[in-house]
């Protein structure tokens, strides 16, 4: 029997406790009605006994009602209460029955049926409760009816059958109620388990889970909101209406939520959450519109939010790091530009005057040789500066190709001419070979020549006897393209096999002693590799120690019509102005003014000079010039400002005079700034006499008599006049 005291019996006790006041009222009412056919003292005594039983029940069922722990003693006490209560009602029904009156029989029957119904409704939740409150009273009532001497056999049979039917209905209802109770219990248990699992997730996950109506008002928020905002769930729900969102993000989030409700589906938003302490915390929320399974109608919005302060901090750090890197790159670029300018400015004078000296007939053979050595050394230093500049541009991505039609054989021959004197001075043979059907190709001829010149210079540097051979091999590559293989073979010192793999790395020499014996930065081959790869080709080397090396590169370039090709070698052709010119030289360094004068003294070029842009503007107000050679970095007024001022002058002649930048600023962006300021061309320092003459010839060719006539003092070969502010 003790096994029947399960949790359902405690649930029955809790239910009975809830209905106790109603039962007490019914008991008093039944006792009052009973006074109509029963003695009053008996009715009063019955009411007192019933209320006493109910009072006992209040005490013994209260722990179950409050959900407190129960003991076997409390459960037995509640069972005793049930027995007393049933006994009271059974006694009243028996008293009614014994009156022998029809009304008494009706009252007794009603009480018996009510007790059985009570058992079916409440007691069926527990087998023990059903037996105590339903089966036992039903059997007792059946016993009274069957033993009543006032009924004959037929009456007994009819009464018994009727009572059995009543008990059967009660049992069937009880069975159904018990089954429904078990099903409900399983459902509740499953629901409780599911809720428990959900609670475990919701209470222990770092993410905040919430539910809101389609209007955005929150209905539920998980306990993890406390860690995220400092609010308890109840406090956070009380805030409501997007007031937990930072004011700067509130309207955007409200609009995004409204758009989500209109479109359905899911969305993600990043915004700042206002914490209880007033601080703001970045969160990322994923919103999903939930729909009814049956109708598909939108029901609510489920959101999952997580703290992204760490990610935002990392993003800020990355932005700051990028800004620092950009600033560092800008500082590096500025430093490179300044250093290039500062190195090229003195080199301009050194290379220019040493070239003039070594070619002078007034020097002794020894002095001429010394001047040649100075020129050669300054040229080597310029190559170092150019290598550093080119490599920096290649690494930073500022190096751009300029594809033009060119003849590869012309490039090879013109490049060989540049080092012919160097090869002859060392007693080396220099040969150019070509194989395959030649064709004009589309590519950056000057950059190709730069790579070839670098490979030739290396070959001559490391070769003491024999010679150097340049081979240009072409072959069809299909689809209007040709394969070009260029190789430079020498009979020099060669390279050890273990050093071949690193030969194209920057700052690398095949041997530590190489840089001491032959010089160099170790950037030349690295630059060649970067340029060739930028052209989409590949480069390599084959060498045997002591027997020489062959450096090669391969490219695949489009074929173009020979009639449209512009020979790269044509750039090397000598040119000079076809007529006398009047030139304004704007240069703040006196030695550079003197160098230009000496370079041009053999030609019919009259030169006026100005120390800065302001003096140049005054000179242009007083006279007309065929050309202006303009330095950029000058005191008082720099060249860029002066060029813009010249382009805004009133006189058409001054406004249209060709301005040629002559500066040590040679970076692409610096050249572009010159053109953007209104200059027409650019000559980099150190100045090459041939390039200077070609540029003067090109820009003076289109200016005819009208411009020349405007100059009052055209004539004197090599004449130099100083423009002054006075």
Image (cartoon, grey):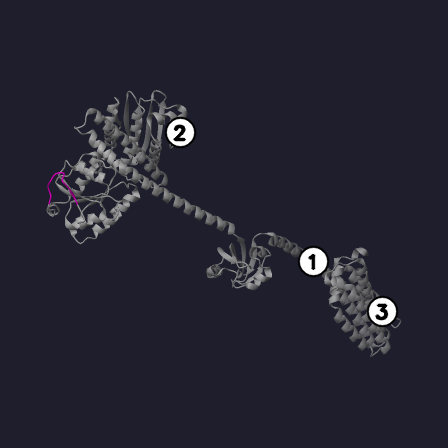
467 left or right of 289 in image:
left
Q: Residue furthest bottom?
A: 36
Q: Secondary structure at mark 3?
A: helix
From where the camera sits, is residue 476 visible? no
Q: Residues within 10 Å of mark 2 (few under 14, many from 20)?
A: few
Looking at the rendered structure, which numbered label has been put on residue 185? Answer: 1
Asked which quadrant contains residue 45, the reply is bottom right
Where is residue 315? Give x, y as percent: 47, 49
Q: Residue at x 86, y 77 (%)?
A: 41
What's the magenta region?
Answer: 713-722
From where the camera sits, is residue 275 visible? yes
Is 297 located above or below residue 377 in the figure?
below
Instruction: Say whether marks 1 and 3 touch (CB < 8 Å).
Output: no
Q: Secondary structure at mark 1?
A: helix
Q: CA distance from mark 2 to mark 3?
A: 117 Å
Q: Secondary structure at mark 2?
A: loop
Q: Residue at x 44, y 48 (%)?
A: 320
Where is residue 637? Give x, y as percent: 25, 48
Magenta stretch: includes residue 720: yes
């Amino acid at each position: 029997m003790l096994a029947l005291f399960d949790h359902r019996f405690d649930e029955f006790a809790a239910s009975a406790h809830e209905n106790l006041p109603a039962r007490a009222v019914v008991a008093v009412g039944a006792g009052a009605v009973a006074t109509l056919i029963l003695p009053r003292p008996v009715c009063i005594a019955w009411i007192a006994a019933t209320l006493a039983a109910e009072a006992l029940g209040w005490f013994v069922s209260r722990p179950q009602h409050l959900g407190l722990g129960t003991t076997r003693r409390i459960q037995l006490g509640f069972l005793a209460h049930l027995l007393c209560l049933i006994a009271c009602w059974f006694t009243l029904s028996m008293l009614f029955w014994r009156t022998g009156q029809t009304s008494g029989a009706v009252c007794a029957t009603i009480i018996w049926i009510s007790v059985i119904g009570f058992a079916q409704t409440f007691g069926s939740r527990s087998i023990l409760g059903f037996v105590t409150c339903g089966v036992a009273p039903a059997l007792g009532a059946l016993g009274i009816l069957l033993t009543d001497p006032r009924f004959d056999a037929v009456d007994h049979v009819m009464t018994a059958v009727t009572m059995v039917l009543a008990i059967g209905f009660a049992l069937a209802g009880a069975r159904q109620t018990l089954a429904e109770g078990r099903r409900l219990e399983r459902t509740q248990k499953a629901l409780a388990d599911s809720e428990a699992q959900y609670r475990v997730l919701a209470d222990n996950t770092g993410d905040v889970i919430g539910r809101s109506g389609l209007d955005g008002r929150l209905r539920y928020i998980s306990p993890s909101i406390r860690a995220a905002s400092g609010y308890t769930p109840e406090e956070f729900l009380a805030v409501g209406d997007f007031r937990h969102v930072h004011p700067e993000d509130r309207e955007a989030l409200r609009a995004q939520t409204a758009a989500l409700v209109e479109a359905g589906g899911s969305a993600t938003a990043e915004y700042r959450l206002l914490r209880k302490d007033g601080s703001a915390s970045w969160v990322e929320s994923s919103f999903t519109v939930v729909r009814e399974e049956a109708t598909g109608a939108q029901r609510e919005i489920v959101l999952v939010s997580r703290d992204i302060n760490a990610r935002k901090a990392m993003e800020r750090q990355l932005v700051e790091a990028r800004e620092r890197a950009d600033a560092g790159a800008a500082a590096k670029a500025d430093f490179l530009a300044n250093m290039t300018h500062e190195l090229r400015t003195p080199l301009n004078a050194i290379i220019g005057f040493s070239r003039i000296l070594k070619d002078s007939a007034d020097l002794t053979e020894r002095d001429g040789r010394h001047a040649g050595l100075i020129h050669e050394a300054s040229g080597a230093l310029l190559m170092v500066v150019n290598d550093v500049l080119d490599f920096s541009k290649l690494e930073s991505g500022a190096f751009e190709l300029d594809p033009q039609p060119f003849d590869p054989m012309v490039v090879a021959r013109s490049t060989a001419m540049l080092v012919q004197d160097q090869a002859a001075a060392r007693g080396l043979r220099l040969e150019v070979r070509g194989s395959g059907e030649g064709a004009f190709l589309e590519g950056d001829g000057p950059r190709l020549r730069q790579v070839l010149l670098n490979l030739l210079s290396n070959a001559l540097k490391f070769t003491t006897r024999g010679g150097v051979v340049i081979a240009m091999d072409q072959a069809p590559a299909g689809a209007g393209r040709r394969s070009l293989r260029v190789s430079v073979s020498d009979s020099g010192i060669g390279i050890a096999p273990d050093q071949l793999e690193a030969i194209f790395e920057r700052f690398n020499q095949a041997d530590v002693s190489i840089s001491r014996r032959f010089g160099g930065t170790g950037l030349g081959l690295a630059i060649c590799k970067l340029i060739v790869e930028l052209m989409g080709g590949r480069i390599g080397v084959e060498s045997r120690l002591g027997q020489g090396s062959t450096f090669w590169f391969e490219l695949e370039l489009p074929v173009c019509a020979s009639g449209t090709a512009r020979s790269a070698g044509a750039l090397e052709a000598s040119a000079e102005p076809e007529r006398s010119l009047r030139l304004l030289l704007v240069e703040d360094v006196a030695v550079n003014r003197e160098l230009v004068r000496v370079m041009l003294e053999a030609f019919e070029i009259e030169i006026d000079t100005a120390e800065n842009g302001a003096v140049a503007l005054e000179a242009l107000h007083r006279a007309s010039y065929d050309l202006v050679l303009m330095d950029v970095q000058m005191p008082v007024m720099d060249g860029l400002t002066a060029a813009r001022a010249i382009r805004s002058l009133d006189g058409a002649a001054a406004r249209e005079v060709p301005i040629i930048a002559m500066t040590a600023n040679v970076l692409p962006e610096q050249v572009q700034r010159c053109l953007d300021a209104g200059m027409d061309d650019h000559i980099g320092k150190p100045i090459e006499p041939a390039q200077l003459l070609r540029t003067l010839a090109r820009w003076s060719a289109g200016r005819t008599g009208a411009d020349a006539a405007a100059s009052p003092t055209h004539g004197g070969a090599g004449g130099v006049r100083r423009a002054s502010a006075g």
